[in-house]
Image (cartoon, grey):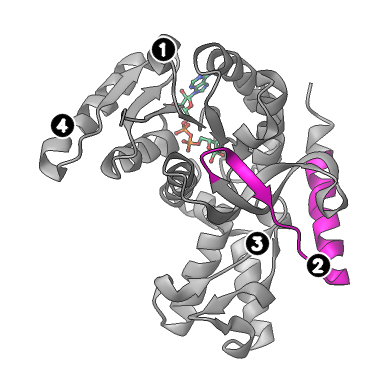
Amino acid sequence: LKRKKISVIGAGFTGATAAFLAAQKELGDVVLVDIPEAENPTKGKALDMWEAAPVQGFDSYVKGTSNYEDTANSDVVIITAGVARKPGMSRDDLVQINQKVMKSVSSQIAKYSPNSTIIVLTNPVDAMTYTVYKETGFPKNRVIGQSGVLDTARFCAFVAEELNISVKDIRGFVLGGHGDTMVPLTRYSYAGGIPLEKLIAPERLEEIVQRTRVGGGEIVNLLGNGSAYYAPAAAIIEMAEAIIKDQKRVLPSIAYLEGEYGYDGIYLGVPTLLGADGVEKIFELDLTENEKAALDVSAQAVRDVMTVLE
Ligand code: APR
């Protein structure tokens, strides 16, 4: 069996962390890419990771580069390139700068890895995923955005802490855009199969939901000069693993909607089946009136950002 190849575009905090996780999990050989001005630090980070291989015993080679030829024939490409938030900024403040980055990165991926599946992390992620979809011309199932895995992880972490129950037993469920307008479906959230609504009082559950919504901002404020990267990197690698190993995981993805949930022509977070063909299925659930109204707000927020796209 030929070894898989994962390219990570953007060798900053998130990209480097994701690359190291991919190598440690032996998802395949890893190529870490950044702009020519950052070639040396990128090579240095990759070499540093590769030098951990003998200690940790992983057989993934890690290469740092600014040359897209090195990414040729990647199975999965992860995009974390662009600028991150600083305190006081919203994800949407990043749209114009990061859209330019998405355009240049997309053309290189389409040229060198036309059969790859792309997972986008760069914010504002719903609109950036749409940009990559348009610019690459790839089929919709092979251009995916990450937000729900991270939002769910944050929710589950807070719930595990609240109940003093292992994170392994907590399951959350989030729909919609990333962060502030996300729609957590607490009625689909469990601890060891027990609905959370039976374990946590409604007001307290709502507080946890609210903390989850602004979870990215909480980290931005604590870090002081950048945005979260450990949990985002872990989230994107869970999606990459599902695709590379054809695991058929049910995970929330930012997927292109053509009528699902009543929306057309936008990328939005929905429950998906992730396997070798990327988004192999979108699960449509019946929503209550309140949930649908919240999802409408989320979809509108994504559309508002999309109107700024050039
Ligand atoms: N091609 C490749 N890399 C690029 C490009 C480009 N055109 N433009 C910028 N980069 C690189 C930067 O040089 C930098 O190394 O992207 C990297 C971004 O890294 P950080 O600044 O550390 O940002 P990070 O915290 O990793 O966040 C990256 O992910 O979660 C999102 O909102 C976050 O949009 C942000 C992205």
The amino acid type of the residue labelled 2 equals Asp
The amino acid type of the residue labelled 3 equals Val
Q: In this view, does 12 lie above or below 261?
A: above
Q: In which quarter of the image is the C terminus?
A: top right
* Magenta extent: 275-303
- Furthest-front residue in this view: 1
Labelled pair 3, 1 in contact (Cβ < 8 Å)? no
According to the picture, the residue beneath numbered tag 2 turns out to be 286
Comes first in the chain, label 4 or label 3: 4
Q: Does the magenta stretch include residue 296?
A: yes
Q: Residue at x 44, y 75 (%)?
A: 169
Q: Is residue 90 visible?
A: no
Residue 74 position in % (x across, y down): 44, 23
According to the picture, the residue beneath numbered tag 4 turns out to be 51
Comes first in the chain, label 3 or label 2: 3
Q: Is residue 217 magenta?
A: no
Comes first in the chain, label 2 or label 4: 4
Q: What element carries label 3?
A: strand
According to the picture, the residue beneath numbered tag 1 turns out to be 37
Q: Is mark 4 on a helix, strand or loop?
A: loop
296 lies left or right of 169: right
Q: Is mark 1 on a helix, strand or loop?
A: helix
| Separation of marks 4 and 3 at Cα, in angstroms | 38 Å
Of discs 3 and 1, which sits in the foreground? Answer: 3
Labelled pair 1, 4 in contact (Cβ < 8 Å)? no
